[in-house]
Image (cartoon, helix red, strand yellow):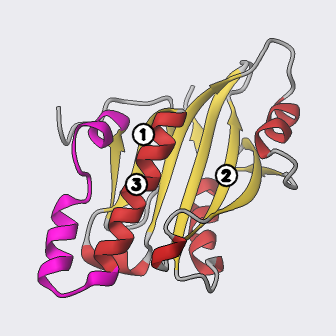
Amino acid sequence: MTGQVAPTAWSILAPPGWRRMRAGELRQGDPLGEFVRAAREAGRADLVLQARSLVAELRSQASASALVELYLPATAEAAELAPASLTLSRYRTEEGVQPRAAAVRMAKSRPVEEVDDAGALQFRFRAESSRGADQGVHGSHLLCVLPRPGSADGLLATFTALHDGSGADALLALGEVMLSSFTWRS
C-alpha cells in the first residue's frame, strides 16, 4: 500500500512539497532515500547530513512511541526551506486524568501553554535535542498534546526542526501553523 494513506479521524494541513506517510513506511524503508540521492548528486553534503539526522530522529521517536503517521518534506526545495518533520503518536491516560495534567506529565517540568486552535484544545511545550550536535545538526522540538474530546486518549504531535545551532524560531513557526490547523473529525 505504499503511497496510499488510510483515512484518519483528524486532519492537518501540510506545506506544499510535504508528504504524509503512515508509520509503517518509516519502519519498512528509507522515506528520504530519493531525496538523499538527489542531494548527493547535487553535491549538497549538508542536506544529506540533515536528511540522515532527521530519519534517525524519526526512527528513534517511532521506537519509543505509538507513532501513527508523519509529515516530511518530499522535495529538495521543501527540505531546503524547512528541514523539519511532524509526527503524530497515540497516547492514552488513565480514566479521570484531565488533559492538562496529562500534558504537564508529558512536558516533564517544561512550561506548558494551553491553546484552543480551530476548535481543538491543545497543550504545547518546547524541547531541544543534541542528537547529531557533534556533526553540527541540532534539533528543536515543538510538542503538542491533542486530547480527543470526550475520551482518555489523544495524539502527541512532535514538530522537529533541524538547524545548525543558531536557533529554529522560523521553522518552529511553521510547526505552529501546521498544529493550528489540526482538527478532529467526528
* The C terminus sits in image quarter: top right
Q: Mark 3 or mark 2: which is in front?
A: 3
Q: Is residue 84 visible?
A: yes
x 34%, y 67%: residue: 51
- x, y (%) of residue 21? 33, 44
Residue 107's x, y, as percent? 79, 46
Q: What amino acid does circle 2 point to?
A: Leu
Circles 3 and 1, Cβ within 8 Å, touching? The answer is no
Q: Please, what is the three-letter code of the amino acid marked with disc 1? A: Glu
First along the sequence among labels 3 and 2 = 3
Q: Which residues are magenta?
A: 23-46
In the shown orientation, is residue 47 left or right of residue 183?
A: left
Q: Secondary structure at mark 1?
A: strand
Q: Is residue 118 in sight in this rendering?
A: no
Query: Which residue is rendered at x = 30% and y = 37% of the image?
Result: 27
Q: Is residue 34 magenta?
A: yes
